[in-house]
Image (cartoon, helix red, strand yellow):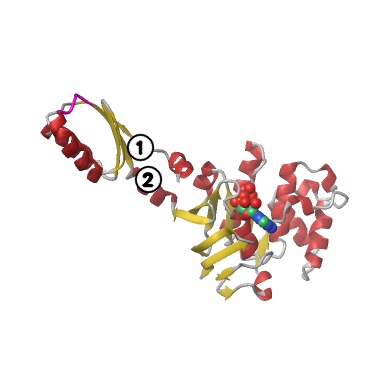
Amino acid sequence: MIAIETKQLKKSYGASPIVKGIDFIVKQEEIFGFLGRNGAGKSTLINMLTGIIQPSSGTYSLLGVKGPNDQVKKRIGVMPDYSILYSSLTAMEHLKYLSALSGKSAGKEWCMEVLTFVGLEAHARKKVAKFSFGMKKKLGIALAIIHDPELVFLDEPTSGLDAESAIQIQKLIRRLRKRGKTIFMTSHNLAEVEKLCTRIAIMKEGKIVKSGTMDELRAFYRSTIKVRIKHSPVPASEQMKLHQWLESAGTDLEVNDPYVTITVKDENRIAEIIRAFQQCRADVLRVEVEEPSLEDIFLDE
Ligand SMILES: Nc1ncnc2c1ncn2[C@@H]1O[C@H](COP(=O)(O)OP(=O)(O)OP(=O)(O)O)[C@@H](O)[C@H]1O
């Protein structure tokens, strides 16, 4: 079954478009990561999918049901912002009271099982006032799964955490998947989604600029090769011809004598470029090839 499907989902505030027509599909039991910088529109998207805000246009469905839909809401879990936690309540009280509020009161045993799952079993009776930030995030995940949902939304589950706590949360997310849950998470940490997610979408300024498995994204980026060539002077009579040829051979052409920089999609092009210089009676003195990292491309996109 398809866990999430959106079609041209949009959200504007006044005249400002924030999410600009998003189409994607998340299959069941995936950990799908939405990666984007601050302000890309990730939280706005999650808030639309979880029914907190209404889309301006477009449609979405969750677990095969067109949203927003109260019945399907019971089958999804949303990690709350830690600021909604009550400092005077214990972890156990949070689970009991908040599950009662949502209409399906959780028993003590089940609450304990969920707290054990997130690693808070020893802190069940501790007041949240005494919780570290990482413990609050774990309690947030516990609250998201207390009603045993099929699909779990986690908005920046590890942001602000130290490395060790982030790893604990990442392990927790993997274990959720092993239990058959579908996870939709946002992050601005490329290394994190690379380790954790089965597929990712890169979001920039309200649009998806690329999506796929990490292997697919890497393959795409590997096919982008930046070549820098140092050459001997090109005879004036040949310069125009060479320039025109180079323009057709790749993109981002920069000519800065004695260097030419060009981006090509296929490494066979490099040999052709060298031959083109020779045919124009110039020698290639040096070739430097740079394959950009995913991080470079992501930041440049
Ligand atoms: N209620 C609102 N009214 C007006 N603008 C808003 C509102 N909510 C969000 N925005 C704007 O929408 C843009 C996207 O915000 P959003 O929180 O979705 O981004 P994000 O990718 O989740 O970023 P972050 O990682 O910082 O949370 C921002 O420019 C934000 O100021």
Instruction: Give neighbour class at mark 1: few <14, some 14-19, many 20+ (Cα, 10 Å).
Output: some
In the image, is residue 27 above or below residue 254?
Answer: below
Q: Residue 5: where, in percent of width, then height? A: 52, 68
Q: Is residue 231 left or right of residue 17?
A: left
Front-most of residues 287 and 25: 287
Q: Quadrant of residue 265?
A: top left
Q: Quadrant of residue 70?
A: bottom right
Q: Is residue 204 left or right of residue 264?
A: right
Q: Which numbered tag is attached to residue 19?
A: none
Magenta residue span: 231-235
Check residue 233 for magenta coloring. yes
* Lower sequence index among marks 2 and 1: 2
Front-most of residues 112 and 229: 229
Identity, as a three-letter code, of the amino acid under mark 2: Tyr
Asked if the residues shown at circle 2 and circle 1 are in contact, with their CB atoms under 8 angstroms apart, the answer is yes
Q: Residue 282: where, in percent of width, then height? A: 15, 28
Check residue 187 for magenta coloring. no
Q: CA distance from mark 2 to mark 1?
A: 8 Å
* Residue drawn at 58 percent across, 59 percent down: 17
- Magenta-highlighted stretch: main secondary structure? loop
* Residue drawn at 27 percent across, 43 percent down: 250
Identity, as a three-letter code, of the amino acid under mark 1: Glu
Note whether residue 172 is visible: no
Which residue lies under the disc numbered 2? 221
Residue at the right extreme of this rendering: 88
Which residue lies under the disc numbered 1? 291
User: Which SS class for mark 2?
Assistant: helix
In the image, is residue 203 above or below residue 74?
Answer: above
